[in-house]
Image (spheres, helix red, strand yellow):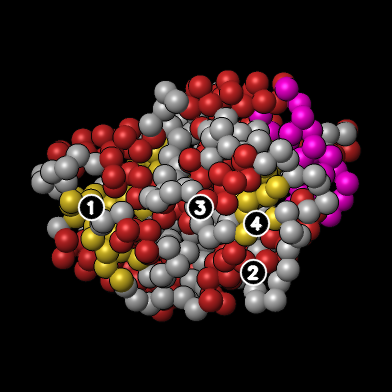
Amino acid sequence: MATVLFVPVTFNLAETTRMIEVARALAPEHRAVFMAYEHEYVHLIEAAGFEYRACEPAWSAAERQQAIDFDQGRAMRSPFTRELVAARVEVERRMIRATDASAVVIGSNITSLISARAEGVPLFYPVPFALTGPQVAQTRRMHLIAGSGRVARLADLVATRAFRWLYTRAPVAPRAFSSVAKANGVPPLRTVASMLEADVNLLTVMPWELDGYGLPDDYRRVGPIFARLDGELPAIVAELAAAPEPLVYLGLGSSADRALALAAAEQLGRLPVNVVAPIGHYLEPGDVVPPNVHVTDLLPAHLLGGLVDAAVLHGGQGTVQTACATGIPFVGLGLQPEQTWNVEVCVAQGNALRVPPKHVGRPEFLDAVRRVLADPAMRAAAVRVQRAFADEDGAAASARIIEAATSRTD
């Protein structure tokens, strides 16, 4: 039996559920242990039946928001002080030894890049292809500038070149990662790309997302991994699906904000549709949404196939892949470059449209929703993509790769 230590950032819903799916796919003789610093989605780990170790130091709400802003490129200042990075690396090294872990699996918990390497334990990262080093280095247009006209294309080319240099070459990583890495006897992390690259990077994508790209040896395609939350759909979903009006799913994951949730709900309230919206975690007491928008808690979205006619999604890989796997065409917003890329991949397949989040209040947003609901070509594309997804199991493929590595280290 080998112990696999999972270290997700547990205020990131997609990341937490991705780790749960990989842990579920491990062979029964292996032991999965989770550790994390924050608490938002820990209940999902515990509900799935996995051993969980709560750790410190945790971030405050303000520091978590600062981390999200840093991750999404809205801020250059990060909450990664030298004291925090050093403390977390020490905690993680102790945990690796205490659990006798043979492998560490991460989401975006950057300190694990130092702790696992310092302990000599192989490090695995199930990760979208977007914003990996190979993707940024080889992509001509990152869709940083919206638009298809000549000026927009040229502006995006310039923006992509600048982004590529900043991401892959500029020494912009917080200094704490270099100094703490050196103190622990491992190579320093200096670029953004180096902060997002494990020993083995498991690409959670479909084959067509890699067309035209070359991959280094430490990158392996495993296929989509998305949440399959336990439980049943709330009764309101079946009621709305049986109504004569189309049913739209509004899924904004854990990286949106209250303003976007309210704006999207208000706009969808103007259409002759019903909306099921698991956005309650964004709203505050006193917030009012239109009567046709039904707010719920998080729900098992993988069960929505055949019930929902279209979706509006923030663009996180988990929500996008869930829509693809269930045959639901969607409007994708894209709150940061990785999410924009996830949406554009589907635009190319024909099962999605992209509207920049700043344009949610404009007519183009509702026009896009109307088209996704009415265009038979988009629905046919969604069915075609769904059939392709049925042949993929990224969690199982990841588990087999991790297990093979642990057998070599035992």
Bin the neighbour count of mark 4 within 10 Å (Cα to Cα): few under 14, some 14-19, many 20 and up.
Answer: many
Instruction: Determine whether, in the image, residue 341 is placed left or right of residue 115.
Output: right
> Label 1 vs label 2: CA separation?
34 Å
> Label 3 vs label 1: CA separation?
30 Å
In the rendered structure, which amino acid carries the disc numbered 1? Ala
Bin the neighbour count of mark 1 within 10 Å (Cα to Cα): few under 14, some 14-19, many 20 and up.
Answer: many
> Label 1 vs label 4: CA separation?
37 Å
Q: What secondary structure is found at the residue carrying circle 1?
A: strand
- Residue 325 at what x, y percent from top left? 51, 32
Label 2 near label 1: C-beta < 8 Å? no
Bin the neighbour count of mark 3 within 10 Å (Cα to Cα): few under 14, some 14-19, many 20 and up.
Answer: few
Label 4 near label 3: C-beta < 8 Å? no
Label 2 near label 3: C-beta < 8 Å? no
* Viewer-side label of 2, 4: 4
Q: Earlier in the sequence, mark 1 or mark 4?
A: 1
Q: Earlier in the sequence, mark 2 or mark 4?
A: 2
Q: Which residue is mark 2?
A: 283
In the rendered structure, which amino acid carries the disc numbered 2? Leu
> Label 2 vs label 4: CA separation?
13 Å
> Label 3 vs label 2: CA separation?
19 Å
* Viewer-side label of 1, 4: 4
Q: What secondary structure is found at the residue carrying circle 4?
A: strand
Q: Is residue 368 magenta?
A: yes
Q: Which residue is mark 3?
A: 234
Numbered range of the magenta stretch: 350-376
In the rendered structure, which amino acid carries the disc numbered 4? His
* Viewer-side label of 3, 2: 3
